[in-house]
Image (cartoon, helix red, strand yellow):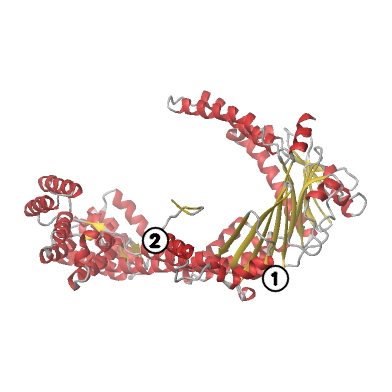
Amino acid sequence: VGLRGDVVILGVRAELLDDVLALMNGNSSKAPLGDDARFRAAFAELPPAEDLMTFFDVHALTGPLRGMLGGVVKMVGGAGDHYRNTGQNAEANTINGRAMAAYRSGDRDKALTLVKQAHAIEPTDSLITYNLACFSALAGQKEQALRALNDAVEAGFHAPRKMASDSDLNSLRGDPRYTAALARAGALAEIASGKDVVRNSADNGEVRALTLQAWQVYEEKDFAQGLKLCEQAYAIAPKDSRVLYALACFHAVLGHESKALDFLDEAVQAGFYSPRHIRKDPDLESLRSHDRYNAAVSLAEQHAAAYSKDHDAGNEAIVLGLINRIADAVEVLDYVASVETTDGYSAWTETMAVLVPDARDRAIYPIFGKRPQLTDFDKYLPAETLSFSVAGGIDVGELYKFIEDTIRLGGPEGEKLLQKWAGIQEMAGVNIRRDVLDWIDGDSISVTLADGGGSVILMKVTDEEVAREKVGAAVTFGTTTVTQLASKNPMFAGLAMVGLRTSPTDHERLEGFQNIHVAMFPTPAVWGVADGFLIFGKSADAVARCLATGAGDHPNIRSNAGAMSEAIVPDGPFAAVSLTDQRGLGDELAMIAGTGSMVLGMAGAFIPEPEIQPVLGKVSGILSKLTPVLQKIDFYKSNANLTTFDGHKWHVRTATHYFSPDERSAKNAG
């Protein structure tokens, strides 16, 4: 934090602060942002900035962010740190703890002396040996540090991330022996990171049935019968890795060590890459001292590590591909510039979001860039409209294709995910593209009428009959499911109180529409399809009024002088336009706070924990006191927005309208 002339400066990074100060002093080697042609072009097109101006270079953020996320993915996807052979000697552990305490207090000489004592007691402890390497490096004893580091890795300190980031080893970094130790730790960590894998084994069929029978008789201690069953499976599938491993186990428990070792080796060769399971399996206890057993486990470790590495590489490719795909999508934007001004009791913001020159060639562009612009914003807005939104949505079909193509970029793993998704849809008896996306157009209109007249949502569809069929089936399924749950399952008996059901709407203008009854609401909601729209309304009258307006049988919003004076009316094609009434904002916030206070107060009676009850009581009291304060937020009128798109840039105008002091006084007095 600083002050330079009449400018208060808040800095986060010293390097950036130095650049800014140099620019302010006129002696910077870097060009100011104002010299950027894009910056000059943006603010030449926008109105003069009065209150605020902003410029956001999208690529300046996404470039470094892309690299950082890629590095994180590679780090997470790599072999993790593993620690073996440590903490086995109590005396050595105690002394090592004292050494660490000395190190943390800054007494490095004492730390080195103590860790040498601990190492003399337990020279095979990997953590103590690693601490010896660190403290020796800090003391300038490089040769001892390098020897200890190598010994620590061989003893079980398979922690490449720790070694690479530990500042105690900075003095060793340039030595080839340090590099070799780090590489060795990485290789051993990869082996230790390998997960148990079983390949080349049948998951069903006769062979699987025989092995399951073998394990059933195993539970009954009939090992000879289990062996016979496994031999039958072996005759059918001599390369099945699970069958080979089962034979190794049965021979081992029956004392046939040589055959057990033969089959264990064959099992690993065939695909039983499960070193952790092999080490823990009590059936193989008699084989542990054999060199062939250790060789088989080592081979299983190598195969498991290689398989895990390949599998992780596939997942890494998917994540990296997703990161790059999202970054490419975001980078379709070149920059965003905006200015804010004040005109009387209205605050205006104008924003330009400009696309890169090759935006039309990018995969993301068809989702939003090829849809036709809207016209006739007022067609379905009655004169009684209080708030509205008319928006040209995205192309949902292109969005779905973009997501599929993004997953497909992950290669084989991506294709597997798509196949799983197809299987899930098949099981559910639904096809998202055919049953949902193909008949949704994307454009939408929402209307709220004044004086409690209700609200209506209209969503444009490409096929009225399909929309009516699909939504009707969904509504029927929902109401039937609620009824069945309430009648058959006592846990959901409360759903019966909802009283969810449907009935035909009898309004003369709403042929084919349905009522949706909910017991707690006196007036049913309605839904139906008309004029190329899927329509949901809070009441039949509200929907009928919108449709009558669309047909020219009812005056539209242009006859509403108040709304028209506050809305930003498009004078040509547009992407979106809206007006949101905010006159009751304070009361709405106060109602939310009051409801929250009541709920928390009631919750305290049902929560027995004495630590929680006072907290709930205090929060409830705060919300209760906040309610009259929120009611004082009575100075907003409305918020208006208009967005246009010319294929290369969005231009957004926003206005927030406030009551003047005189208007506010008159309103409060009234």
Between tags 2 and 1, which lies in front?
1
Question: Would residue 392 be found to the left or right of residue 184 on screen?
Answer: right
Query: Between residues 403 and 549, which one lies in front from this camera angle?
Result: 549
Q: Can you identify the residue that label 2 sits on?
A: 208
Up/down of 252 relative to 548, above or below: below
Element carrying mark 2: helix
Look at the numbered discs 2 and 1 and tell me whether their residues touch, using CB distance below 8 Å.
Answer: no
Quarter that holds the C terminus: top right
Residue kind at label 2, given as amino acid type: Arg
Question: Would residue 504 be found to the left or right of residue 418 on screen?
Answer: right
Which residue shows up at 37% across the image and 56% down it? 212
Question: Would residue 642 be found to the left or right of residue 312 on screen?
Answer: right
Quadrant in the rendering for residue 505: top right
Residue kind at label 1, given as amino acid type: Gly
Up/down of 611 relative to 15, above or below: above
Specify whether residue 391 is in view. Answer: no
Query: Between residues 658 and 510, which one lies in front from this camera angle?
Result: 658
Q: Can you identify the residue that label 1 sits on?
A: 647
Quadrant in the rendering for residue 248: bottom left
Place of residue 468 in the rendered image (x, y in percent of width and height, measured from the top left): 77, 55
Place of residue 389 in the rendered image (x, y in percent of width and height, measured from the top left): 75, 52
Place of residue 444 in the rendered image (x, y in percent of width and height, measured from the top left): 75, 56
Quadrant in the rendering for residue 465: bottom right
Q: Residues within 10 Å of mark 1 (few under 14, many from 20)?
A: some
Specify whether residue 170 is in view. Answer: yes
Element carrying mark 1: loop
Question: Cα distance, mark 2 to mark 1?
Answer: 60 Å
Q: How crowded is mark 2: few (under 14 residues within 10 Å), some or many (20 or more)?
A: some
- Which residue lies most toward the front here? 5
Nearest to N terminus: mark 2 or mark 1? 2
Which residue shows up at 52% across the image and 66% down it? 327
Up/down of 10 relative to 137, above or below: above
